[in-house]
Each structure stands twice: as C-alpha cells, then as structure tokens.
Image: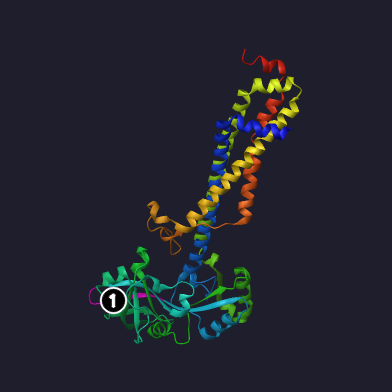
Amino acid sequence: MIWRIAWRNLWRHRTRTVIMGSAVALIYGLTLVGLGINDDGHRRMLEEATAAAGGDVLVHDEGYWDTRASDRVIRRGPDVLETVRSQPGVRLAIPRVLVNGLVSTSAASSAVHLRGVDPELEARLTDPADDLVRGSFLAGERSDPIVLGARLVEKLELELGDRVVLTASDPGGELTRALFHLSGVVETGTRELDEMMGYTSIEAAREAVGMEGMLTQVGALAAEEVSVDALAAGLRTALGERADGLEVLTWREAVPEMVGFIELDDALGYLYMGILLVVVLFSITNTFLMAVMERVRELGLLNALGLRGERIGHLLLAETVLLTGLAMAAGFALGLGGHLAVDHWGISVAAWGLEEIEISGLDVADLVFYSTIDPAKWALASALVGVATVASALYPAWKAARLSPAEAMRFYE
C-alpha cells in the first residue's frame, strides 16, 4: 500500500517530480560521461607516454637516461638485443642508436637529436612516417639518409637531396663528422621536436659516430598478459652479469612527470565530480525538505487517519526510491548517449584553445579524447548516486515523521 500511494504521489506533484528527477538524471548522466572521457583520456595519455619513452621497458647503459652522454652505450648491442627479444613476455624489442650533435649547412648550424632507427620496428610502437610532409622516410637506396623536423629544415635552408654535416662525439669522446643527405621532412606540430628532431637508419648512425656493434637503447613492449614491472624484473634477471652495467627502467620510471600529471589530473577529475555531486545532493535535500513543508497539512491528515509518523517517513522514502529509479534510468540513457557521441566525434584538447602543452616529450594539445566504458566504475558511480540521492531524503523523512496531527492541521491557519 505504501508503494502504491508513493507512486501516485509522484504524479500528483508532477512539476516537483520533474524538477527533482531532472537534477538526479543530469548529475548521474554527466558523471557517467565524465568517467568515460576521463578513463579514455588517461588510457591514451599512457599509450602516448609509452611511445614517447620508447617502450614499456627501456634498456640502456647505466646513467644514460640522466646524462644522455655519448659514451653511455650498450657495447654488446646484438647480445643484449637478442636477450631482450628471447625473454618471455616481450612482444617486441626495438633497437636504437641515439646521437646528440650539431647539424650544419653552408647557411646555418643547429643542435639535433638524431635517432637511428629500424623504420619497420619503430612503426609498430609509433610511426614517425605519419608526420612526414615531404620526401620519404628512410625508404630510398641511399646509405646516408636523414629526415629532419620542419623548423630545423627551414632554419638550415635545406631542400630535399641537400647535404647535411653531422658533428658529434663518439663513445670514446672524440669529435666525428659525417655526411648525410636530406631525404624527408617531418612536422609533429610540437615546436621543440620540429626544431631538434632527426631520424636516420641504425647503420648510418652507427657509422657516423663509430658505434659498430653498439646500441644506445633497446625498447621492449610487454605482451598483454604481462605487467610492465614483472617484465622489467625478468629482464634484469635474464641479462645476468651484464645487468650490472646496464639500466632497466619501466616507462613510469623514465617519465615520472607524465605519471604525476596523469595522477593529478585523475584526482582533480574525481574531486570535481565529487564536489558537483555534493552540491546537487544538497540542492535535492533542500527540495525534498521544501516539498515536506508544502505537504504538512496533507501529511498531518494522513497521520490523523491512522498513518503514523514512522509510516509517513517510510512513504516519503518510498517516493524517493521510486523517483531515484526513474531519474537514474533517464540519467543512464543520457550518459550512454553522451558516451556514444563523444566516442564517435571525440573531444580535441586543441579545440579548447590549448597549444603546445608538452610533458616528457608528449604534446598533450595534440590529443583527441574519446570515451570508454569501465563497467566497474560505472557500477560504482551508479551505486554512489543512488545511495546518496536516497540518503538526501532521510532528514526530510525524519522531519515529516515527527509531525503531530494537531500541529499539521494548524499549519495554514
């Protein structure tokens, strides 16, 4: 009987029901959409951070990551590469020769961070050829190709096929020079990368700085079922004695700034949604209380007819449960619709007027966020909104339960 009366009461006061239900539906729907965007954005940032670092796990000479010195090299490169490749849980091992030096032409000189890469292997992590705007990406027959950033090419006044001289230090600390020919131009949209980035083949980079049989870095990608920390520990064990002179870092250890940024952004996102939920729930509580005050005479009459205070409180809670159920059904439809829309069209960070926000080599402004459903988080959010909404009616229900018939019938006198 209580539930039947509660259901009828909802539609006797349609305006109030719609207002309170809309508030619950809106906060619930926005919470679900916010969770979807937040989770997808952080997932994409983690993927981009892994690509920016060079892999899930990085192997290089001890101290290289802090100093980037030219004498910090893996001297037994092929052996280390083969050990990494053969380790269980390694999906892909990517060798690199990294050189910091100076590129010169007759017009100008500029610093360069030259990456000697295997284009096919590198493309399986992140394909630099996607940023190619002119020429080809290390695909010609030349043995000395170089691909440079667009701003660097402009500064050096280069055209495709022009000669470029690289000056750098070899592993022994001696200055060396090598001749390259410009084969391509890349443009990432990030100023610092376009002013300093360069690519060549591993063989050409080794020959340029006298690193025959050596590597600077091996990046390892973990299989889906293997955790990054477990893979790093396994590689340290597999490398054995050689691990004493090498450094094995997870991408989180390599780019702690990005990890900190994601954790901070995640915390702020949940804090924002929590504050929004609290504000809305206070508003709902106030609305419920005002509804009780408007219905004092009605509730007093019910009390006089034999519906005692405790059951009046149960009646208001039943109304709240029914209202919450209807509102959350509408809110879920709203949240799912928002999720599908965002997942289809995406939200570009650059569209908000943010440009060149670089963290650990990753330009955050280039990211486009979509939406993803984490069933556990959606279920938790649903439970939280449902419980909190019903809880917001506890005080108004308690207030109604304490009304005496005599006081209630005199309320409008």
User: Would you say the magenta stretch is mainly helix, strand or loop?
Assistant: strand
Residue 61 in view of the camera? no
Residue farthest toward the top in the current orientation of the protein: 413
Q: Crowding at label 1, few (<14), some or many (≥20) Cα neighbours within 10 Å? A: some
| 105 within the magenta span | yes
Position of 289 with respect to 105 (left or right) is right
Residue farthest toward the left in the current orientation of the protein: 107
Q: Which residues are magenta?
A: 99-107
Position of 69 with respect to 403 (left or right) is left
Q: Could you tell me residue 94's position as x and y percent?
A: 50, 78
Q: Could you tell me residue 335's position as x and y percent?
A: 54, 49
Residue 29 in view of the camera? yes
Name the colouring of the figure: rainbow
Task: Find disc 1 in the rendering and name its residue.
Answer: 104
Position of 159 with respect to 396 (left or right) is left
Quarter of the image for the C terminus: give it.
top right
Q: Is residue 177 above or below residue 262?
A: below
User: Which residue is nearer to you in this view: 5 or 379?
Assistant: 5
Q: Could you tell me residue 267's position as x and y percent?
A: 55, 51
Quarter of the image for the N terminus: give it.
top right
Q: Where on the picture, by quarter, is residue 120? A: bottom left
Q: Where on the picture, by quarter, is residue 92? A: bottom right
